């Protein structure tokens, strides 16, 4: 199957699941549920949940068993974007070609929508059939999105605004603000499939390298970070090296590594 066809099919699977599970606008109070849905639809590429589903399948698991976790990861991502766009954070008026959540609903509802999305993500993870796996996934995601992970990266990013960032600071932001949730995605997929500790370690390194390259390509598009300090061509070469490292970590999957390897290659040719 061609990658584009695969990605579109998985996006539709995830979107259908999200629409089924999230509270609808008919639930009171409607404003908060409308804002939550607005933050999720129309969605982006659904990279994180697709990575989770693909990793689970590559490790011998069933996608349906992983779907609650994958959807929760996308909800966490959506909450982080709603809060990142706020005036006190990145102060972005638009997200994916439409007014950002706080521009559409006001700051108070946007903050509450982000809070509600994050809370719902953990509720969704707790609904999986295997409670032992649910608990392990909840612990994993919690660790990677908190103050020692994604939130920590966002904190350093906020505190560094207005000044020149040195390389260690940029790398910390890369590996935490972006990389932790991407690494969590492939790890969660492996965990849902019952992957061995050695397989999870390889998936972790794959996710970390992929996350670093992903943020580098972001910076090339936005003319920030390494792209500003080193130039876009040098940044792209380094991103290419990280993608090669990421793909090297997939050798344990043998002939089941195709989708994860193809997703890694696609990161290098991102246009948005």
Image (cartoon, rainbow, N blue to C red):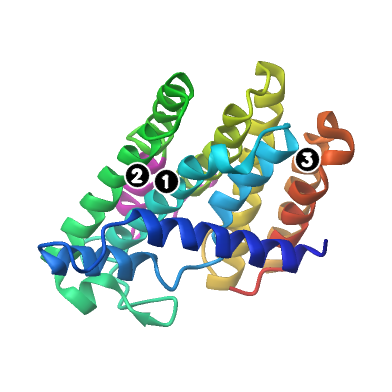
* Visible residue check, residue 231: no
Q: Is residue 3 left or right of residue 117?
A: right
Q: Name the residue under label 1.
A: 72
Of circles 2 and 3, the one toward us is: 2
What x and y, as percent, mark residue 203?
A: 67, 33
Which numbered marker is on residue 121?
2
Residue 4 image position (x, y, % from top left):
73, 68
Q: Does residue 86 appear left or right of residue 185 in this picture?
A: left
Residue located farthest toward the right when viewing the structure as drawn: 255
Q: Is residue 49 on the magenta stretch?
A: no
The answer to whether residue 265 is left or right of residue 134 is right
Q: Check whether the beta carbons of the residues at disc 2 and disc 1 lie within 8 A of each other.
A: yes
* Residue where numbered disc 3 is placed: 245
Query: Does 7 sit left or right of 237 as displayed?
Result: left
Asked whether the beta carbons under mark 3 and mark 1 sit within 8 Å of each other, the answer is no
Mark toward the start of the polypeptide (2 vs 1) = 1
Question: Where does residue 182 sit, x and y in percent of width and height?
Answer: 55, 45
- For image coordinates 52% across by 45% down, the residue present is 67
Task: Kindly state the secondary structure of the residue where label 3 is placed.
Answer: helix
The residue closer to the viewer here, 169 or 11, is 11
Seen from the viewer's position, the closer of residues 86 and 71 is: 71
The span picked out in magenta is 150-167
């Amino acid at each position: 199957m061609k990658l584009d066809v695969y990605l579109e099919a998985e996006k539709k699977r995830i979107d259908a699941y999200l629409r089924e599970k999230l509270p609808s606008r008919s639930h009171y109070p409607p404003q908060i549920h409308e804002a939550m849905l607005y933050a999720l639809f129309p969605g982006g590429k659904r990279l994180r949940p697709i990575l989770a589903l693909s990793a689970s399948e590559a490790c011998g698991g069933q996608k349906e068993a992983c779907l609650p976790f994958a959807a929760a990861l996308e909800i966490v991502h959506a909450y982080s974007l709603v809060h990142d766009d706020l005036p006190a954070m990145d102060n972005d008026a638009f997200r994916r070609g439409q007014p950002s959540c706080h521009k559409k609903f006001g700051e108070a509802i946007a903050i509450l929508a982000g809070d509600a999305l994050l809370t719902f993500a953990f509720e969704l993870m707790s609904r999986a059939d295997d409670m032992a796996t649910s608990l392990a996934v909840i612990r994993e995601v919690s660790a990677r999105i908190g103050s020692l992970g994604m939130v920590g990266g966002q904190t350093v990013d906020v505190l560094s605004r207005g000044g020149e960032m040195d390389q260690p600071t940029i790398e910390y932001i890369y590996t935490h603000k972006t990389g932790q949730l991407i690494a969590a995605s492939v790890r969660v997929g492996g965990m849902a499939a019952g992957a061995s500790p050695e397989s999870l370690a390889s998936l972790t390194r794959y996710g970390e390298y992929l996350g670093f390259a992903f943020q580098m390509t972001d910076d090339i598009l936005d003319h920030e970070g390494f792209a500003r300090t080193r130039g876009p061509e040098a940044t792209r070469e380094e991103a290419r090296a990280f993608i090669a490292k990421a793909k090297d970590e997939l050798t344990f999957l043998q002939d089941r590594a195709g989708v994860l390897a193809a997703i890694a290659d696609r990161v290098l040719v991102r246009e948005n």
